[in-house]
Amino acid sequence: MTTTSDIEHMISRVALGDRTAFSNLYDATSAKLLGVALRVLNNRASAEDVLQETFMKVWRYADRYSRNGMSPMTWLITIARNTAIDRLRATKDESDVADVMDTMPSSGPTPEQSAIASSEAGRIMGCMEQLDDDKRDAVRGAYLDGLSYADLAARFDVPLNTMRTWLRRSLISLRECMSQ
């Protein structure tokens, strides 16, 4: 489990040119940063390119990160998000796409897919409502807000292993509810 102070330490070591710390930082944060880039770009190949650019920037500018009370993940996510947005802007076609929009098939879901997704969402929400308030909020924090187990344990003032148990049991309950 990588803590905030571990990530801060890795960033400070990267600022000194420590390749091992850079590798460890990549291992600890790359999945989350790839998710950020993927959310902005909706294209895995482009998101992977952005992830590479992000870590090149981290290598170059790690000395600019200072411990100012902000989360080091916030700093890293900001770099990834801004890099992804820059990529999106750079690849945006300057031509008028309104002319071709009429001939292109819709990339969104079909009416049938929308109805099924809406039904499933309703079922999931119903199952979530069956969980205790704290457990429901923990599941939302972990799987919708992307909070770590450690962050959730601190938020709910419970030991880390208790948080893991809450989430595991809540997911089992949700799976059972959804299978009915």
Image (spheres, grey):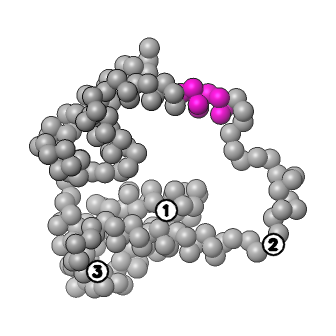
Amino acid under disc 1: Ala
**Foreground pick, 77 / 52:** 77
Numbered disc 3: secondary structure: loop
Q: Is residue 87 magenta?
A: no
Give the residue number, with chain letter if any, for mark 2. Answer: 95
Please indicate, yes or no, whether residue 21 appears anywhere in the rendered image: no
Is 35 situated above or below 61? above
Quarter occupied by residue 63: bottom left
Is 61 situated above or below 153? below
Residues at badges 3 and 1 in contact (C-beta under 8 Å)?
no
Q: Earlier in the sequence, mark 1 or mark 2?
A: 1
Magenta-tinted stretch: 113-120
**Foreground pick, 142 / 105:** 142
**Foreground pick, 166 / 9:** 166
Q: Position of residue 136 (x, y in %)?
A: 32, 34
Q: Residue furthest front?
A: 133
Alpha-carbon span between mark 3 and mark 1: 20 Å
| Disc 2 packing (10 Å; few <14; some 14–19; many ≥20) | few
Q: Position of residue 32 (x, y in %)?
A: 38, 57
Residue at (82, 52) in percent of width and height: 104
Residue at (81, 72) in percent of width and height: 95
Amino acid under disc 3: Tyr
Give the residue number, with chain letter if any, for mark 1. Answer: 37
Alpha-carbon span between mark 2 and mark 3: 39 Å
Is 164 situated above or below 89? above
**Quadrant location of the C terminus in the rendered image:** top left
Which dot, 3 or 1, sits closer to the camera? 3
Numbered disc 2: secondary structure: loop
Q: How many marks?
A: 3
Give the number of the disc on residue 65. Answer: 3
Seen in the image, is 129 located left or right of residue 24?
right
Residue at (34, 72) in percent of width and height: 75
